[in-house]
Image (tube, grey):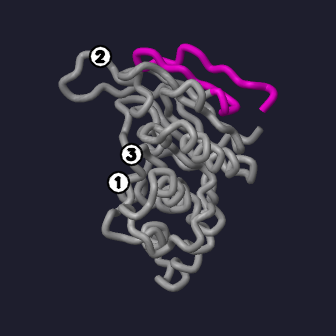
Amino acid sequence: MTTLLSARGLSLTYPGSSAPALDGVDLDVAVGESVAVTGASGSGKTTLLHCLAGILSPTAGEVTVATRQGAVALGALDDAGRSRLRREELGFVFQQGLLLDELTALENVAVARMLVGVSRAQAEAEAAQQLAHLGLAGLERRRLGELSGGQAQRVAIARAHVTGARLVFADEPTGALDSATSADVLDVLLASVATGRTLVVVTHDPEVAARCARTVHLRDGRVVADTADVTR
């Protein structure tokens, strides 16, 4: 399989802390994989995701991402370069969606395209198409307060997908949802994997992890188990 994301020797210690949040993590993620990162609170799950996505810079180690232009080492990029890579190559879905309350569903998705220079008209057309694909046709002009939790997370997924991102990071995307809505949102995320996207999801929920093809378990900032479901 083709490697899309590679981490070697990732370590990170936060200022003022004596214990590392990450301690020598090695990880490869292949194109088309769905990977659940699990572990107890404080195990380093979110820190790992943020380092893999270039949101945080590790104290040591390197992350390499296979972009459309070729392999890129995140450590070789400045802040502007990492921001550009996130806008153009990566998608993000977080527990609360990190959507803008004052914008409509359509505007929340379209802004991801406008940030890379696409015209407003074209961005909104692409956003509408993504929202319709995720079952939100007719809700484009609603603001977040007018949507259910599951609908809002679908908006966040549409925003992650509209850029054409091949790699989507999700941090507890079902954490604030009831079990039925959680299953629905996970269905949407995993359906995108079937079309060729790659998913790395941080979760404390064993049911979410069980539906991913691979589980990476962290303890004290280290990978202590890495298991794959060969049936997926």
Examine the rendered structure and indicate whether residue 151 appears above or below residue 211: below
Residue range of the region highlighted in magenta in the rendering: 210-232
Q: Between residue 122 and residue 3, name the one nearer to us.
A: 122
Horizontally, is 106 left or right of 55 in the view?
Answer: right
Q: Amino acid at mark 1?
A: Asp
Does residue 52 appear anywhere in the picture? no
Tell me the residue that label 2 is attached to.
19
- Earlier along the polypeptide chain: callout 1 or callout 2? 2
Label 3 environment density (alpha carbons within 10 Å; few <14, some 14–19, many ≥20)? some
**SS for dot 1:** helix
Residue 214 located within the stretch drawn in magenta: yes
Q: Amino acid at mark 3?
A: Ile
Label 2 environment density (alpha carbons within 10 Å; few <14, some 14–19, many ≥20)? few
CA distance for labels 1 and 3: 9 Å
- Earlier along the polypeptide chain: callout 2 or callout 3? 2
Tell me the residue that label 1 is attached to.
79
Q: Amino acid at mark 2?
A: Ala
Q: Quadrant of residue 134?
A: bottom right
The residue drawn where x is 47% and y is 77% is: 117
* Percent position of residue 140, x then y: 50, 73
* Percent position of residue 110, x then y: 48, 72
CA distance for labels 2 and 3: 20 Å
Does residue 166 appear anywhere in the picture? yes
Q: How many marks?
A: 3
